[in-house]
Amino acid sequence: MRPITDIFLPACARLNPHPTYIPFRTQLSPQNAPDIFAQFDIILDCTDNPATRYLISDTAVVLGKPVVSASALRTEGQLMILNYPSRSPGDKSGGPCYRCVFPTPPPADSVTSCADGGILGPVVGVMGVMQALETIRVMITSMSEDGKPSTGAIVPSLHLFSAYSTPPFRTIRLRPRRQNCAACGTEPSISIESLKSGSMDYVQFCGSLNPVSSLMPNERLTARDYKIWLDSHSNNDKGILLDVRERIQYDICALPGSICVPISEVLRSSRSSEATNGELPAWVPSSIINTDTATPIHVVCRQGNDSQAAVKILKQLGLGQGGKRFIGDIQGGLDSWRRDVDPQFPDY
C-alpha cells in the first residue's frame, strides 16, 4: 500500500505548485517528532486522535513553536492557535498549550475518529481554510518589544463551527497557561530528553479503546484465502462472517451475508458485568448461538486490527468450543479484500 504522503503530495502540488513539499514516510513518534518539528517555524495539527495531538503540542512547546490546530467530525469543527506567543515554560506571557486546554484526555470509549464517525466534506473545507488563514495571521502578526500584543494581535481562543447551528460560528476565549502544566508550566516534566527516551507513553496516557491483539497465524486468513474458502463451499456452508466496523461504515459497503457487530459494543460489554455473569452479551448474533457449534466464524474490519480484538473476545466467551469451532479474522481487513480480491470494492 502506498504511503499516504505519496498520495497527498501530488494532490497538493496540483493545487499549488509553488511551495516545497517534503514527505516524511514514517509515523510520528516521541522519538522522531523533535527532529522533524525543528525544521519548521509553525506546526499545523490536522490529526484526529488525542494521543497524537498531545504529542504534537508537547513537542512544539519544548521547541518553542506555535501550533495551529484544526479538527472536524461529522458536521462540526474546532480551531485553536496554541503556544502563541511561544515562550519558555513557566513564562505566563506565553500562550496556552493543548494540555492547558485539555489537562485530562477524554475517555477512550468517547473518542470517535473521522474514519469511524464520518465527516461532511464541506466541513473539512471550512476548517482547512480557517486553519490556513490563522496560520497566515501567526506569520504576519508581530509583538512589540515589551512583550505586549500589538494592534490586531492574536488572543488565544477556541473557534467552534457547527454546520447546522444558527449562528454556525462561536468563539471561546482560552484561559492563560496553567502553571502546573506538565509541558509549559513552572516545573515542566516534559523535555526533549524525556520525549526521545520514550518515557512518555502517549497511548497509555490517553488510553486505548481498540488495542491490536496479535493472533496466531492459524487464527488468520488472508483475503485471497478467504475468497478461495468461500468459492469452495455452498451457500449453506459458508459459515458466519461478522463485520465489526461501526454501523455508519457498514452501511456504506459490506461483504454479502455479513453481520454487523460494532466493535464499540463488543469492547464495551467485555468491560462490563455482562462479561462476568455467565450470560452471552446482547450483541452476540442469534445465528452464532443457534447454529452448529462447528460452524466457523470469520471476523472482518476495515484494516485487520479491530477484528483481532473481536476474535479474542469471542473465544473468551467460550464460542470457540474449546478449539472445536474455528474463530479467526481476515488479515488486512476490507482494505486487503479490495486490494487482493475485488478492486471494485468501495474505498471510503
Image (tube, helix red, strand yellow):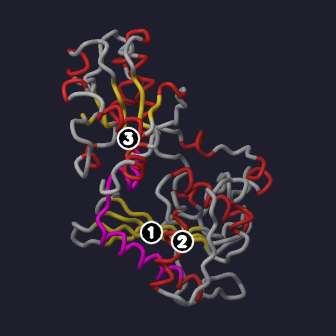
236 left or right, relative to 122: left
Residue 95 falls in which quadrant of the image? Answer: bottom right
> Observer-nearest residue: 318 or 181?
318
Quadrant of the image for the C terminus? bottom left
Looking at the picture, does residue 129 appear above or below residue 215?
below
Name the N-terminal-most of marks 3 and 1.
1
> Observer-nearest residue: 8 or 57?
8
Q: Are marks 1 and 2 in contact (CB under 8 Å)?
A: yes
Query: At 31% from the left edge and 43% from the top edge, which residue is drawn?
Result: 246
Per the model, the C-alpha gap separating discs 3 and 1 is 31 Å
Front: mark 3 or 2: 3
The residue beneath circle 1 is 79
Task: Find the magenta span and give its range.
Answer: 111-135
Mark 1: amino acid = Leu
Name the N-terminal-most of marks 3 and 2.
2
Checking the image for residue 301, the label placed there is 3
Residue 41 visible in rendering: yes
The residue beneath circle 2 is 68
279 left or right, relative to 236: right
Query: At 69% from the left edge and 53% from the top edge, which residue is drawn?
Result: 30
Label 3, residues with CA under 10 Å away: few <14, some 14-19, many ≥20:
many
> Observer-nearest residue: 107 or 284?
284
Mark 3: amino acid = Cys
Q: Position of residue 121 (x, y in %)?
A: 31, 69
Q: Are marks 3 and 2 in contact (CB under 8 Å)?
A: no
